[in-house]
Image (cartoon, helix red, strand yellow):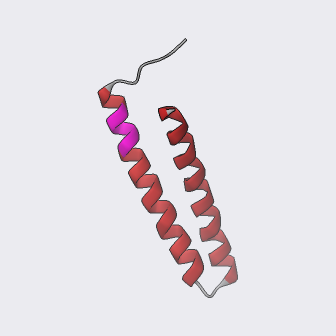
């Protein structure tokens, strides 16, 4: 069964993709610039979580 995504849902997914992508990029940047290894690892984990959410949102469009 094929479900159709409404324009409102598409807009919400698009906004979420933008936010998740930006958060992921910023977290990766912070992880690469931090000198404290524990903080850098924490930021890397945050970036990975947002990247996973980004990919899950992309799957909704396929």
Q: What's drawn in magenta, residue-wise?
A: 10-14
In the figure, 8 relative to 55: above or below?
Answer: above
In this view, the residue in front, 25 or 49, is 25
Residue at 51 percent across and 40 percent down: it is: 57
Residue 46 appears at what percent x and percent y? 59, 62
In the figure, 48 relative to 41: above or below?
Answer: above
What is the chief secondary structure element of the magenta stretch? helix
For residue 11: magenta?
yes
The quadrant the N terminus occupies is top right
Residue 2 appears at what percent x and percent y? 51, 15
Asked whether, in this view, residue 11 is left or right of residue 19, the answer is: left
In the figure, 52 relative to 47: above or below?
Answer: above
Residue at 37 percent across and 43 percent down: it is: 14
Residue at 64 percent across and 85 percent down: it is: 36
Residue at 58 percent across and 79 percent down: it is: 32
In the figure, 44 relative to 1: above or below?
Answer: below
Q: Residue furthest bottom?
A: 35
Asked whether, in this view, residue 35 is left or right of residue 5, the answer is: right
Residue 24 appears at what percent x and percent y? 51, 61
Q: Residue furthest front?
A: 62
């Amino acid at each position: 069964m094929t479900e159709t995504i409404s324009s409102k849902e598409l807009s919400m997914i698009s906004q979420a993709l933008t936010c998740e992508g930006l958060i992921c990029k910023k977290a990766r940047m912070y992880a690469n610039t931090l000198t404290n290894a524990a903080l850098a690892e924490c930021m890397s984990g945050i970036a990975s979580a947002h990247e996973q959410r980004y990919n899950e949102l992309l799957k909704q469009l396929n």
